[in-house]
Image (cartoon, rainbow, N blue to C red):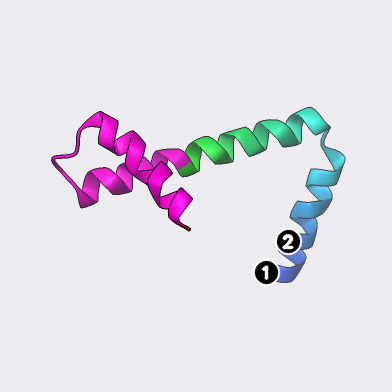
């Protein structure tokens, strides 16, 4: 399957879901992105405290 039909199929699946199901996916994706951001900070700054690991991604978002 090429990317375009795959995307169309994915969108169709989303349309078949309830609002609650789509919202749950959104929450999961948000948590995954936050987890990845924290892991990246930990790899970039191995000595970072947990407070810094939480604060730095927020600062980066505000700068963009």
Give residue 40's position: percent from left, percent from top. 31, 49
Give residue 60's position: percent from left, percent from top. 40, 51
Check whether the beta carbons of the residues at disc 2 and disc 1 lie within 8 A of each other: yes
Is residue 25 located in the magenta-colored stretch of the structure?
no
Q: Element under label 1?
A: helix
Instruction: Determine the residue positioned at 29% across, 37% down.
Output: 53
In magenta, the rendered stretch is 34-63
Give the Cα separation between the discs numbered 2 and 1: 6 Å
What residue would you read off at disc 2? 7
Is residue 45 located in the magenta-colored stretch of the structure?
yes
Give residue 6's position: percent from left, percent from top. 72, 62
What residue would you read off at disc 1? 3
Instruction: Determine the residue positioned at 19% across, 39% down.
Output: 48
* Residue farthest along the left direction in this orientation: 47
Quarter where residue 1 is shown: bottom right
> How packed is label 1: few (under 14 Cα within 10 Å), some, or many (20 or more)?
few
């Amino acid at each position: 399957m090429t990317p375009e039909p795959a995307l169309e199929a994915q969108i169709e699946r989303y349309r078949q879901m309830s609002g609650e199901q789509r919202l749950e996916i959104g929450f999961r994706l948000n948590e995954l992105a936050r987890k990845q951001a924290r892991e990246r900070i930990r790899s970039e700054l191995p000595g970072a405290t947990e407070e810094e690991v939480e604060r730095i991604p927020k600062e980066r978002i505000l700068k963009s």
